[in-house]
């Protein structure tokens, strides 16, 4: 796979495409980052952006993982001491997951975000940025119902991180898009260069295929959201995978599956995804060359897929039954989280 293909595979957008292409033209030694608000245990959301970091490392880039302790504090995630402790654990979990230690730099936000220059630049950015713009940037990130002053400092600091960590590329889920747009517009206003960004998709809610997966409740349906984390033992993981919404082939016989209760939502929000296939696309195939599905001989015997498209086609055409696909999915996800699970113990 060429470097540009590696940089952009499974990414929802490159912002802007020309600048990402320029990074892909000579990736060796260039620096990319993702920032994470520390939360004890790695889950599918962290793993999705980490897969992108592994792609970038395979293209020869250096990777920075920002353990954004101050950001988590500003977003109401706990006391500063609690957040710090969690950040330490997270580092080891990323390494267990497969980030290459020799080309990954782990940085605690608080290590540089209280430096005089940083704070002065934060003030300069605060002077240039409207309250409205800063608040809008937080729409997909803000925890808690009520916006606080902390929530408008947050995106300005995230923009400054890109300058202070000396980065060539920012990576994040699509929920980081508005902050990265703010960075594009506002870093130049204080004399710095805007950087390009790559955004990974947001997974659909695992049990309904509607709305976003989250580690707490589904913001669309209000129901309990399911996620998979390093804390799950094999049996728990298997049970969770069994409960994933994984519709069979698109056949009139199964049309009911495609007309689920729409939870009273507008059609755009109610778009139905296949989260089981998304897990193959964004989690399994990026990390394994091919996928083998074990099947009893009477159901066609074992079958191997060497690309996501081949597997998705087989599901769509009815050649691969969701139950067989799920059992393979559980096995491969278990392989991915096993090192992290061992590290936690
Ligand atoms: N906003 C991220 C956390 C974060 C990301 C980056 I990139 C930073 O520079 C700082 C914080 C989140 O929503 O988890």
Image: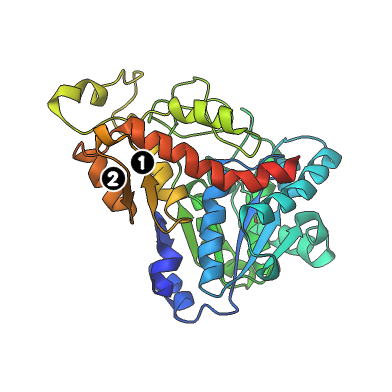
Residue furthest right in the image: 81
Residue at which label 2 appears: 312
For numbered disc 2, what is the local secondary structure? helix
Residue at which label 1 appears: 277
In the image, what residue occupies the spot 51% across and 42% down? 333
As measured in the structure, the alpha-carbon distance from the residue carrying label 2 to the one carrying label 1 is 7 Å
Badge 1, how many Cα within 10 Å: few under 14, some, many 20+? many
Looking at the image, residue 247 lies above or below residue 140:
above
Looking at the image, residue 68 lies above or below residue 267:
below
First reached walking from the N terminus: tag 2 or tag 1 = 1
Total numbered badges shown on the rendered structure: 2
Ligand 1 is within 8 Å of the C-beta of the residue at disc 1: no
The answer, for residue 23, to whether it is visible in the render is yes
Q: How is the image coloured?
A: rainbow
Q: Is residue 304 left or right of residue 148?
A: left
In the image, what residue occupies the spot 79% across and 49% down? 88
In the image, what residue occupies the spot 41% across and 63% down? 8
Q: Is residue 161 left or right of residue 19?
A: right
Counting from the top left corner in percent of width and height, residue 81 is at 86, 41
Counting from the top left corner in percent of width and height, residue 1 is at 39, 71
Q: Is residue 224 left or right of residue 9?
A: right
The answer, for residue 271, to whether it is visible in the render is no
For numbered disc 1, what is the local secondary structure? helix
Q: Quadrant of the C terminus?
A: top right
Looking at the image, residue 242 lies above or below residue 295:
above
Counting from the top left corner in percent of width and height, residue 45 is at 55, 43
Label pair 2/1, CB-CB below 8 angstroms: yes
Badge 2, how many Cα within 10 Å: few under 14, some, many 20+? many
Q: Disc number at residue 89?
A: none
In the image, what residue occupies the spot 46% across and 31% down? 241
């Amino acid at each position: 796979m060429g470097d540009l293909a590696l940089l952009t595979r499974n990414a929802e957008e490159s912002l802007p495409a020309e600048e990402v292409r320029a990074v892909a033209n000579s990736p060796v030694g260039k620096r990319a980052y993702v920032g994470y608000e520390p939360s004890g245990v790695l889950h599918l959301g962290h793993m999705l952006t980490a897969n992108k970091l592994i792609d970038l490392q395979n293209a020869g880039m250096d990777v920075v993982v920002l353990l954004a302790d101050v950001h988590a504090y500003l977003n109401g995630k706990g006391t500063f001491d609690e957040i710090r402790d969690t950040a330490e654990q997270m580092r080891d979990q990323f390494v267990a997951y497969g980030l290459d230690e020799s080309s990954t730099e782990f940085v605690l936000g608080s290590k540089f975000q209280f430096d005089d220059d940083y704070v002065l630049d934060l003030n300069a950015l605060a002077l240039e940025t409207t309250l409205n713009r800063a608040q809008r940037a937080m729409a997909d990130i803000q925890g808690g119902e009520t916006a606080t002053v902390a929530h408008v400092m947050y995106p300005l600091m995230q923009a400054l991180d890109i300058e202070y960590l000396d980065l060539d590329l920012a990576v994040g889920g699509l929920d980081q898009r508005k902050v990265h747009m703010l960075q594009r517009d506002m870093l130049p206003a204080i004399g710095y260069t805007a950087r390009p960004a790559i955004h990974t998709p947001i997974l659909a809610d695992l049990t309904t295929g509607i709305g976003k997966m989250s580690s707490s409740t589904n913001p669309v349906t209000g129901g309990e959201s399911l996620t998979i984390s390093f804390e799950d033992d094999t049996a728990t993981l298997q049970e969770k995978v069994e409960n994933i919404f994984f519709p069979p082939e698109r056949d009139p016989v199964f049309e009911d599956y495609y007309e689920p209760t729409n939870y009273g939502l507008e059609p755009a929000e109610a778009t139905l995804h296949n989260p089981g296939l998304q897990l193959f696309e964004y989690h399994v195939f990026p990390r394994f060359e091919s996928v083998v599905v074990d099947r009893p001989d009477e159901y066609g015997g074992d079958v191997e897929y060497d690309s996501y498209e081949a597997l998705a086609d087989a599901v769509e055409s009815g050649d691969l039954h969701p139950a067989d696909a799920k059992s393979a999915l559980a096995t491969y996800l278990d392989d991915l989280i096993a090192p992290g699970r061992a590290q936690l113990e």
